[in-house]
Image (cartoon, helix red, strand yellow):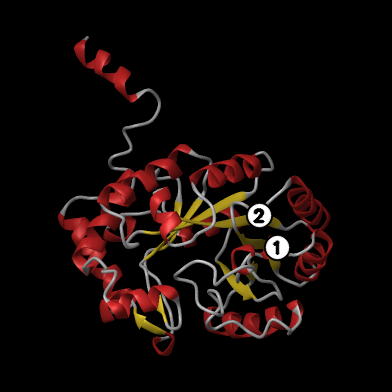
Amino acid sequence: MDIDERYYPYSKYLKKRYGEKVYKLPVNLPVTCPNRMDGDGCSFCGGVGTGFEAMNCETSVSEQLLTTKEKIAKRYKAKKFIAYFQNYTNTFLPVKQLEEYMIEAARMEDIVGISISTRPDCITRDYLDCMKNVSDTYGVKISIEYGLQTVNYHTLKRISRGHTLAEYIDAVLRISRYGYDICTHVILNLPGDEMDDSIETAKILSALPVQIVKAHSLYIAKDTRLCDDYENGTISLCEKEEYLNRLIAFLEHLNPDIAVERLFSRIPEKDAVFCNWNTSWWKLRDELLLRMEEQNSFQGKKLNYLDGAALRLLDNKE
């Protein structure tokens, strides 16, 4: 097995789906998160959400797309793009307003899809029907991105996530009826989580109609409650070696048909007090792939727990 075939990369998934390379263009909408209405949101969330390098949300959708598209097209010779409504909870906008933003993106030349980042507890049929209308009218494919983070609901409560595992499962099942791609974000080294949580997260994703996953290594953004806990010494993070071990176990238990869009987080150095053990993400990826090769590890290697796994014991007796 080639070292680059140890997991199913998102780039390969997109090329199979669209027939050529496709690149995501981040769009920052003027929206917040329901989890920030009465507080600071999740303990790890910075004041700008995840949009550390995003354009101003007051800039029009079309202008944001044109500006970023020009840079990406020139650098990678790309011809097809996905408009990625990235920051905060985009379905926390009124349905009509979200639809207007989606139509503005869908009308842009070379936009073949729209990816919408949101929360499991912030989706209803009205929003899903709105997305279907835009998809059918303008011929763009829809994908929805959920931040699950972990299946450990005790950890979800500690980080003030505002939802638990049940809401995520409900949202995935609702969306699957529409045929949209579902991308799930997970963090494999949240304080309090262990190896078993990483494995169970992979198993839950594999048991559900999920097409894409983004695995994040936890970074600690400045001016967050998690930053306070980290600097006060009230939490500790696992070592790099432990994260790599969890990531390998996660991939081994993950359905090989689920595309992996990310393995490590990225954040500008000026915005964080901790990220990736002061190691560049591409060096971490190289180290991961080398370990997987040495261990003959690959995505789906341990996908042996679904479809009535215990009954296979009877087959072994025959």
- The picture quadrant where one finds residue 219 is bottom left
Secondary structure category for the residue under label 2: loop
The kind of residue on which mark 1 rests is Phe
Q: CA distance from mark 2 to mark 1?
A: 7 Å
- The picture quadrant where one finds residue 117 is bottom right
- Left or right of 217, for residue 160: right
Q: Residue furthest top?
A: 318
Q: Which residue position holds label 1?
A: 92
- Left or right of 314, for residue 81: right
The kind of residue on which mark 2 rests is Cys
Residue shown at the point (27%, 56%) measured from the top left: 246
Return the x and y of residue 176 as percentages of the image width and height: 62, 41
- Left or right of 124, for residue 209: left
Which of the two residues, 177 or 8, is positioned nearer the viewer here? 177
Q: Residues within 10 Å of mark 1 (few under 14, many from 20)?
A: some
Residue shown at the point (64%, 45%) measured from the top left: 175
Return the x and y of residue 72 as percentages of the image width and height: 57, 80
Q: Which residue position holds label 2?
A: 122
- The picture quadrant where one finds residue 3 is bottom left
Q: Residues within 10 Å of mark 2 (few under 14, many from 20)?
A: some
Q: Quadrant of the C terminus?
A: top left
Return the x and y of residue 303 as percentages of the image width and height: 33, 38
Q: Tell me if residue 298 can be seen.
A: no
Pointer 2 with pointer 1, Cβ within 8 A:
yes
